[in-house]
Image (cartoon, helix red, strand yellow):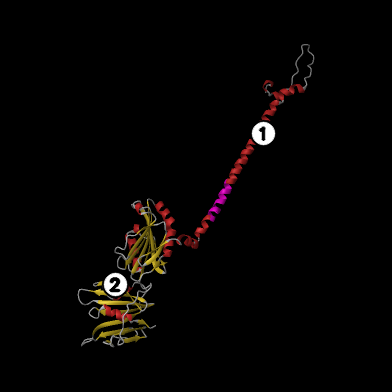
Amino acid sequence: MNPEEAPVSQVPPVAPVTPTGQLPVAVPTSEIQPEISPTPEKPKSKRKIFMIIGAILTLLILGAVGIFTFSVIQKPAEDQRVVEPTNTPEATMEDETGDWNTYNGGGLFTVSIPKNWHVWSYGRGVSKSYYQINSFPENQQEDGRGSVIAFDIQDLDYTEGKSLEEKRQALEQTGKDFPDFAYSSISVQKLDGQDALVYERTIENQPSNNYSKEVWTVVGDTKYIISWGVGGKSSQEVEEIKNRDMEIFDQILSTFEFSNASAASSPVPAPKFEITEDWLKYEDNGAGFSVKYPDYYQLNDEATQKGSKASFLNCSGPYCGAGFTITLYDDYSGGSRREWLAEKFDLSTYELTYEEIGVDGVNALVVNADDSGSNGMTYVVIPGGGSQIFLLTKTSGGESNDFLNQILSTFEFTD
């Protein structure tokens, strides 16, 4: 390096040469220090400033990272504290269903529904009762997005299926015939203590995506179908609505109660008649019943079998003719009484009418089977508890139904 290029601080002081060639006079260092001392101090001052600024920035960054980390760690705990109470079933039921509205389905059922849902009731129609609630108002039905819950109460013969097993077979067959519409699950659950089929399916890539879930059961001679449908413009939207309303649907089911006049509900009143003192009493402790009949009737000894069957003839004329018969069966499974009767007799060619009548505290099913001739029959199906059925039969050529009601008003269980 040339001396000319060296930094000032590295060039030694040079004494001026005198004209006389004398040695130069020493120049005190204190005299040249003011020229060279400021130069090295400048870079040290800048580095110190940069170091201070860097330290401040580092502290700021570390502080921001610490605050962010603390907030992330704390957030799940805060969410958990907010969500946890709503996951308690007892709290949910008390807080949400306690002030819901109660609907009485024509004396057939009662159910509680959220106040902020919209009622679309189309009336009875050809079913026994129909009641519908929606998560959206009626003027938005064209949109097709939201939840619909319907309570469809029907006569046993109105739609397909008369028992849980028959309905299950029909659902499975539908899945085989139309795979795109197959149900993803079919199970048996309880609805107000009654066995019910529960099945669901999701349909995608149709004109509208939808999800459906149905609860299906039969009590006596009445069919109950509770369906929940979800519609949306996309699969994702359907899933979001489904997750939103699933708990509400389950809560609605938990408030459902049967109240219809059937074998599983409160009995209908029995007809009241004055029975004259000359009526006779037949009692069969082996079969577990007793019944009264007029004195012009007599027991048909040939047809009567103690412990299982009692037959009575009408002997009011010169000859004894058709009367009525009470037969004990022990093969009742507790399901539909209509279905049980159809398995015993071929009624396919008859015009059938049904009614309920109270008999010694239970509901009996009265079935009038008429045809174009004179071979009509009346059947009275009386549940006797457990697997027992007392079946009273009478031909249409005998006494009137008013007389039959008089007989039934004297029927008593003796067990």
Residue 204 sits in quarter: bottom left
Query: In the rendering, which numbered label is found on residue 48?
Result: 1
Which is nearer the eye, 413 or 229? 413
Answer few, some or many: residues within 10 Å of disc 1's Cα (few below 14, many 20 plus, some between 14 and 19): few
Of 289 and 70, nearer the camera is 289
In the rendered image, the quadrant that contains the N terminus is top right
Q: Position of residue 203 (x, y in %)?
A: 36, 55
Q: Secondary structure at mark 1?
A: helix
Q: Quadrant of residue 165?
A: bottom left
Report the side of 135 relative to 397 (left or right). Answer: right
Q: Residue furthest top?
A: 20
Is residue 80 inside the magenta stretch? yes
- Secondary structure of residue under mark 2: strand
* N-term mark: 2 or 1: 1
Q: Which residues are magenta?
A: 68-81
Give how far across and how far down residue 14 sits, in percent: 74, 19
Q: Dot 2 corresponds to which residue?
A: 354
The quadrant holding residue 9 is: top right
* Residue 313 in sight in this render: yes
Residue 22, image x, y percentages: 79, 14
Q: Amino acid at mark 2?
A: Tyr
Location of residue 138 with respect to 303 vertically, above or below? above
Do we see residue 203 in this rendering?
no
Q: Give the image location of residue 261, x and y in percent.
A: 35, 71
Q: Nearer the viewer, residue 77 or 278?
A: 278
Q: In the drawing, what numbered circle is on residue 250?
A: none
Magenta region includes residue 316:
no
Which is the main secondary structure of the residues drawn in magenta?
Answer: helix
